[in-house]
Amino acid sequence: MRRGIGFWRWLMPVMLIALFLAVLFWLPWQARQMEANERQEQLIADTLWVEQAVRFQLGRNEEALTLLGADLVAAGPALDRRAIAARLDQLQKNSHELLGITWLDASNHPLMRAGMALGALAPASQTAAEHARKTGRGRYSEPYRASQTQMDYHLPLADGTSLVATYKLSLILDETVPWWFAQDNAISLLGADDSVVALRAAAGPGRGVYTHKRELDLPGANLRLATDSIKSAPRLLPNLLVGSVVLLALGLLISLLALWRHIARRLAAEGALRQQMAFRTAMENSLVTGLRARDLEGRVTYVNPAFCQLVGLPPEELVGKAPPMPYWAPEAMAEYQQRFAAVLAGHITPQFETIFQRADGERVPVLIFEAPLVDSNGRQTGWMGSILDISDRKKAEELNRQQQEKLEASARLATMGEISSMLAHELNQPLAAISSYTTGALNLLGNARQSGQPVDAAQLLPALEKASAQAQRAGQIIRSVHQFVKQREPERQAVDLAQLVDGIGALIELQARKVFVAIQVDIAPGLPCVSADRIMLEQVLLNLTRNAIESMQQSPPERRVLRISAALQSGQVCVSVSDQGHGIADEVGERLFSPFFSTKAEGMGMGLSICRTAIEFHGGTLSYRANPEGGTIFSFTLPDHSNHTGDQHAAYRRRRGGDS
Ligand code: ADP
């Protein structure tokens, strides 16, 4: 189809050019033809003129001879021979073409003559003479050759004599043809068989291009006048014309070719451009990132479909708009205005987050990247912005945060729930003890009252002392649990590890006793205080000891030993919690500190993760190794309080919000 259209589009100009070239070539040919015709016609006219001149000359001679002949016949015997001779002479001298004039008697013997002597008549002349006498009219002989090519004119007279004029043929041409004609033409007289009998070629022979022949129509003589122009066929003008036509045609073809190549190149460039445009449009349309271009005044000059979709407005309502933009949310107007003023002043924030208001009023959180828009001359014409809808990211972040909070809360709650059930169980013991001691004391008092005897203080005191000790213990258990569960900001202080372990000893014991685990505490004497948050550190130790106790549930009773030790190692306080439990397999070890990793049916898998975060917050490290006696040793280091300077508060917060 395209081919067909191309063919017809080219047909017309090609035909026109062909026609133009044909006309260009035909014109000089026509001009040449016309010039040739003109020359030929000129030659014919001139030849006619010469013929007339020849005939006129011969005719004049005929008339003069006729007059003379009439006088001869009229004079008869009274002829004045001298006068006649004079007239003959004059006649012959006036006409240079005449070689001589002879008066012949009836038997062709000369009676008188002027000029050349005739002698015996040539056969051609003889025939003419006889014919003339027979018809009684003047007659020319066929040309014949004597001393030169000649021709006789016989005029019969009434008395039987005749006058004969002998012409030299070449002289006829010399005398009658004007010089200007002879200069341009070779003129000849042709005899019966087209043989040249006389020739005048003043300027050289003719070229045979322009020729003409005319009968001279002389009675008796078969003579023709032939002219042959020395001019050749017209050359200069046609050559010039042909030359210029060829040049023109060549120029035309070359310029057409150049034009064609130019068009082809343009078409190719246009094609490439179209393709690139299509590619770019497809790219812009398929982008999920919104694109927005603005001029230096802040007017929107371009938006892509993704941008329109983002703000819920068609391009017509966006392009050409100047701030305030239809997608600006009223509550953030001041922020937009401030940023726009900065843009006008030529300062952009390359990347920022803000909110847009969709056409339906919904708010969209967006991340915007802005860059200067530079044209092909390197001049800035505006700003280009790419806009990302970050609602999903924001939602995910929020969800993540909420989940993290929930998890931490539930981890705390799980520990708390566990502890509170154990607490209830364990508080039963001191409470039962208190109850029995007080019951004993009451019995003593009751007995004393009944018997009316005074109370024996020595008997009562130990029971009340024991009851008080049990009550204090119960209080301590409740306080430590309360502190553990309380949500609070970390707070550093100098912590004496021996005191700390002592403080949570009751809680650890509570768990240990459930599975019959013995506790060994080994704190090096004179250990310096560490700089730490007391509650966090307690949480770490409680978690590590809980894990250790749980690992030993299946161990033989004699091996159920939990050891808590602390010592100074190269300037740092190192705390270890060791057990002789089932130990940690390699595949478990790989994921040990990952949040929510647990091998326990009821496990949360948060314990170690929280421990590590807490230790790292204190600038220490938490690690584990296999216990040479079987089981596992978890240990962490803490900086000495006097050396501690840094504050890892921020790191801690980050971890709590991130991978914790
Ligand atoms: P949870 O105790 O809720 O499972 P943790 O993060 O405290 O969560 O512990 C993760 C896992 O590490 C445990 O499930 C257990 O398999 C393993 N683990 C922790 N401490 C010990 C230990 N002392 N001995 C053996 N395995 C342990």
Image: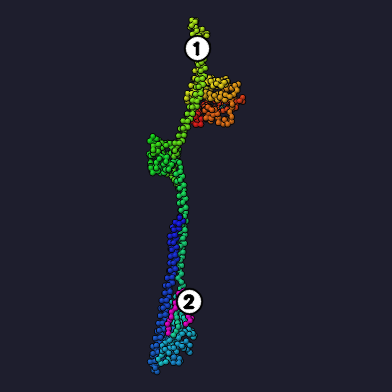
Q: Residue at x 44, y 58 (%)?
A: 8
Q: Amino acid type of disc 2? A: Pro
Spot occupied by residue 204 in the image (x, y as percentages of width and height): 48, 76
The residue depicted at 40 percent of the width and 43 percent of the height is 315
- Quarter of the rendered image showing ligand 1: top right
Check residue 194 in the rendering and tell me which mark sits there, or answer none: none
Are the residues flagged by discs 1 and 2 in contact, CB closer than 8 Å?
Answer: no
Q: Main secondary structure of the magenta part?
A: loop
Question: Relative to residue 532, is residue 286 depicted above or below?
Answer: below
Q: Position of residue 604 (x, y in %)?
A: 52, 28
User: Mark 2 — residue?
Assistant: 205
Q: Residue 469: x percent and y percent?
A: 51, 14
Magenta span of residues: 192-219
- Is residue 42 magenta-colored? no
Residue type at the position of mark 1: Thr
The number of callouts visible is: 2
Q: Residues within 10 Å of mark 1 (few under 14, many from 20)?
A: few
Q: Earlier in the sequence, mark 1 or mark 2?
A: 2
